[in-house]
Image (cartoon, coloured by chain):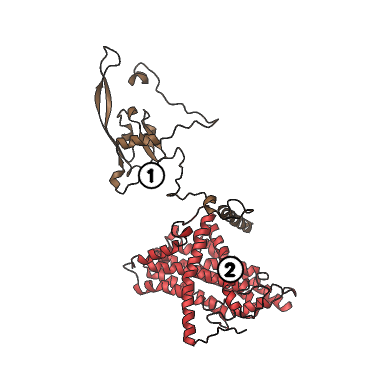
Chain colours: A red, B brown
Amino acid sequence: MIWTLALELAYWQQTAIKLVVVALVIPTAALILGYVFLMKMMSFMQSRLGPMEAGPYGTLQLLADGVKFLQKEDVFPRRADRYVFALAPVVVLVSTFLLFVVLPVGPDAVVSSLDAGLFFALAVASLSVIGILMAGWGSANKYALMGGMRAAGQLIAYELPLVLAAIGVVIQAGTLDLNKIVLAQATGEIFGWGAIGNPYILTQFVGFAIFLVAVQAELTQPPFDMPVAESEIVGGYQVEYTGFRFLFFFMAEFGTAFAFAGIASVLFLGGWYVPGLDPTSGWFNLIGPFVMFIKIMAVSALIFWFRFTFPRLREDQLQKLAWKVLIPLALLNIVVTGVLKVLV
Amino acid sequence: MRGMGMLKGMGVTGRTMLRTLFPDGLRKPVPAPSRGAHTVQYPHVKEAPVPRARGVIGLHHDNCTVCMLCARECPDWCIYIEGHKELAPPRRPGGKPRARATIDRFDIDYALCMYCGICVDVCPFDALFWSPEFEYSEPRIADLLHDADRLADWMETVPEFETYEAGASVKQPKLPEPSQHRPPRSAIQ
C-alpha cells in the first residue's frame, strides 16, 4: 500500500511542498471553476458566448479581472473596525485552505490523513461563518450587517443537514477517515457483486441530494444567496470590500465550491478510486488526482447547473426548507441506514 | 409536484446550453458556440438593428417649417431651433410674394435626448424620422450636439417605410376637416 517517491524527504520539506500545493490549488480551482462554469456554462445556458476577448475564447478573463482587482485602492470605510474588517476575508480564506488539508487524492496523496477527517472538514467549513460575521460587523454598514446576520442564520441552518447527510455515509463505511471511506467504497459489494465497488451514491442517494443542497446553501450560491443578494442588500457583507480583499472572498467562494465538490465525490462517488483497479496499488497516487479532478468537475457542474437555473428564495423559505424538509429527511435517512446496516 | 417543476427548469437550462454548444444537434457534436448563441460579438460583427429601432433622429430639411412644435414638446428641451422668414416669389404672376420659413439652426443634443420620439410623432410636416443607426458615441460630450447638417446626413440611413403586414389595420393619416375659416392644407404650402 505504501508507495513512496524514490527520494526521502524531511518533515519540513514535505510540509513546504504540501503548503505550496494547497496554496496553489485554491486560486487554480477558483480560476477553473470560475471560467468553466461561471463564465462559459452560464453563458451557454443563456444562449450567449461569455468572455471572448482576453486570450483564446476568453480563457484569461479571470486573470485579467484578478490583475484589475490587485490594482484597486484598498478602501476602508471611515467608521469600520479596521482590524476586524481587514482580517475577515483572510479568515474566510483560511477556512477554505483548511478544507484541502484532509481531502485525499490518492492512498498517500493527502496533506494530512486524520482519523476524524470528515469531522475536521465539516468543522473547518463552518469557520467561514465567523469570517463572514466579522465582515458584516466590521464594515459599519447596515447592509453588510444584515448580510452577515443572514449568512450566519443560513450557514448554521444548513450545517445540520450537511453533517447529517454525511453521517449516513459514515454509518455505512464505519469510519470518519476520508481515505478509509474511499477504500470502503472500493472494496464494497452490491449484493455480492463487487465489479464497480459500492459508490455510496447508489445507497445514499437521499444523502447525496441533501448534501448537495446543503453545500449550495453553505456556498451562499443562488438560489440560496440571500446573504449576498445584490438587489435587496447590495451584496451583503461584501458591500464595502474592494480590490484584493474582494478577490479573497471570490477565491474563497470558488475554492470552497471545489473543496466541497471534492468531499462530495469522496463521500458518494468513490473518491480517487476507478472501478476495476486494485485500490491498494500505489499508482493511485499518480492517477488519483486526475480521477478526483474529473469527479470534482462533474459534481461542480451539478452544483453550478443548479445555481444558474433557479431564482433566489425568500429568507423564510430558506429556513423552512432547512428545518422542515432537509433535517427531518436527513434524520430519517440516518435511521434507515442504521437499521439496514444492522439487518443486512 | 414541486420537484418535477424544478427538474423541468434544469432541463430548460440544460437544453439551452446544449443548443448553444452544439448548434448542429447532438448527432454531430462539434462545439460551435459562436453559431449557437443568439448574441453576436459586437465590435467584430455588427448587429443589424430592427428597422424601427430608435437609434438616431434624421432631419428632412425641405419639410421643416420652423414651427417649433418639436422643440416645445421635447421633454428634455434638447432641440434648439432658430429660423427666419424669407420672401419667396409669388406662386402665380401678379400675386403677392410668399413668406417662407428658413432654418438657421436645428440642433439636437443627444447628450440630453431620451429617445422618447415625441418630436418625430408631433412633427406635422414629416420632417423628422427615426433611423436605426446607433454608432455615434463621442469622446467629448459636447460633440453629441448634432447640427442640422449632421441630422440631414442621418436621413440617408432612414430605412424605407415597411408596408404593413397583411391583415393589419392601416392607419389613416389624420387631416383637418376643410372649413371656410381654415384653408385646406395644400394651400398653406
How many dots with numbers? 2
> Element type at marker 2?
helix
Of all residues, the one furthest to the front in this rendering is: A6
Which one is in front, A161 or B108? B108
Q: Is residue B6 above or below residue B70?
A: below
Q: Is residue A320 visible?
A: no
Q: Amino acid at mark 2?
A: Ile
Q: Quadrant of residue B146?
A: top left
Q: Quadrant of the C terminus of chain A?
A: bottom right
Q: Quadrant of residue B82?
A: top left
> Element type at marker 1?
loop
Q: Is residue A190 visible?
A: yes
Q: Quadrant of the N terminus of chain A?
A: bottom right
User: Residue visible at 27% across and 28% down?
Assistant: B102
Residue at the disc numbered 1: B135
Residue A44: percent from left, percent from top: 53, 55
| Chain on which label 2 sits | A
Which one is in front, A264 or A30? A30
Of all residues, the one furthest to the top in this rendering is: B94
Residue A120: percent from left, percent from top: 54, 79
Which one is in front, A178 or A40? A40
Disc 2/disc 1 C-alpha distance (Å):
46 Å
Residue A243: percent from left, percent from top: 37, 66
Q: Amino acid at mark 1?
A: Glu
Q: Is residue A104 left or right of residue B91?
A: right
- Binning the other alpha carbons within 10 Å of mark 1 as few (below 14), some (14 to 19) or many (20 upward) gives few
Q: Is residue A344 left or right of residue B167?
A: right
- Binning the other alpha carbons within 10 Å of mark 2 as few (below 14), some (14 to 19) or many (20 upward) gives some
Residue at the disc numbered 2: A294
